[in-house]
Image: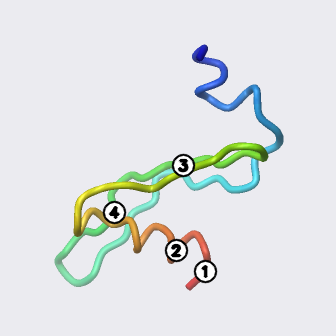
Amino acid sequence: MTNDSIRGSNYGAPLLKVEHLKSGYGQHLALWDVSIEVREGQSVAVIGANGAGKSTLIKIMSGV
């Protein structure tokens, strides 16, 4: 896999792009400087430890 395919240039148009997202609850910082771009034809997974902010990211991206 080349760097170009990792960056997404071998895929279709961007469907979703989030840059430098920050979110928190009270004094707890759930997300800090998160960026993601999903392009047509890509499969994307969000993985991480408990409390890493996965659900928070998905909720923000889906408008919940």
Mark 2 or mark 3: name the one nearer the start of the chain.
Answer: 3
Colour mode of the rendering: rainbow
| Residue located at (38% from left, 65% from top) | 54
Residue corresponding to mark 3: 36
From the image, tell me which residue sits under label 4.
Answer: 31
- At mark 1, the secondary structure is loop
Q: Check if mark 2's residue and mark 3's residue have beta carbons within 8 Å.
A: no
Could you tell me the amino acid type at mark 1? Answer: Gly
Q: Residue at x 77, y 34 (%)?
A: 11
Relative placement, left or right, of 56 versus 11 is: left
Which SS class for mark 4?
strand
What residue lies at 72% left-to-right and 45% top-to-bottom? 39
Give the residue type that dot 3 points to.
Answer: Ile
Determine which residue is flagged by label 2. Answer: 60
Lower position in the chain sequence, tag 2 or tag 4: 4
Q: In percent of the image, x 54 and y 49: which residue is there?
A: 36
Quadrant in which the C terminus appears: bottom right
Q: Are marks 1 and 2 in contact (CB under 8 Å)?
A: yes
Separation of residues labelled 4 and 3 (CA atoms): 12 Å
Whether pointer 2 and pointer 4 mark residues with C-beta atoms closer than 8 Å, the reply is: yes
Q: Which mark is residue 63?
A: 1
Q: Amino acid at mark 2?
A: Ile
Calculate the distance from the C-alpha at mark 2 to the C-alpha at mark 4. Answer: 11 Å
SS for tag 3?
strand
| Disc 1 to disc 2, C-alpha distance | 5 Å
Report whether 17 appears left or right of 26: right
Residue 5 position in % (x across, y down) = 66, 23
